[in-house]
Amino acid sequence: MNKITSFLKEVYEELTKVTWLARKDVMSSTVAVSFVVIIVAIYVSLVDMGLTAMLKVILGGR
């Protein structure tokens, strides 16, 4: 029990040292990450559709 209490005290001390980002910075980073994820998802989907079409042609699929 003593180790748990000590651990939680250390965690609290470390969290008081953290410099948190402003809400505006968090929101702009979230928008940027979301945009990149959407672009990568579109790219991967297009590559997947292209490779599927090529395999159907090569293998004579339906």
Image (cartoon, rainbow, N blue to C red):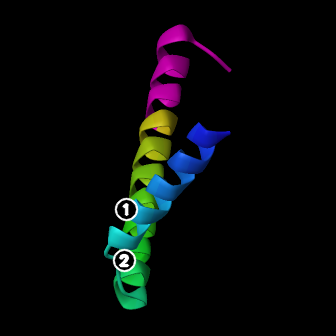
Range of residues picked out in magenta: 50-62
- Give the percent coordinates (x, y) of residue 28: 37, 82
The residue lying at 45 percent from left, 45 percent from top is 46
The correct choice, above or below, for 47 with respect to 62 in the image is: below
Instruction: Measure the C-alpha gap from mark 2 to mark 1.
Output: 23 Å
Outermost residue on the front side: it is 2
Outermost residue on the top side: it is 59
The correct choice, above or below, for 42 with respect to 21 in the image is: above
The correct choice, above or below, for 43 with respect to 24 in the image is: above
Q: Which residue is at the front of the view, 37 or 13?
A: 13
Q: Amino acid at mark 1?
A: Val
Numbered mark located on residue 10 in the image: none
Classify mark 1: helix, strand or loop.
helix
Residue behind mark 2: 20
**Circle 1 crowding by C-alpha within 10 Å: few under 14, some 14–19, many from 20:** few
Q: How many marks?
A: 2
Q: Is residue 32 magenta?
A: no
Of pointers 2 and 1, the one earlier in the residue sequence: 2
Instruction: Report the side of 55 relative to 61 (left or right).
Output: left
Q: Amino acid at mark 2?
A: Trp
- Give the percent coordinates (x, y) of residue 36: 37, 62
Quadrant into which the N terminus falls:
top right
- Give the percent coordinates (x, y) of residue 43: 40, 49
The residue lying at 49 percent from left, 63 percent from top is 12
Residue behind mark 1: 36
The residue lying at 52 percent from left, 27 percent from top is 52
Q: Image quarter for residue 34?
A: bottom left
Please, what is the dominant secondary structure of the magenta stretch? helix
Q: Image quarter for residue 50?
A: top left
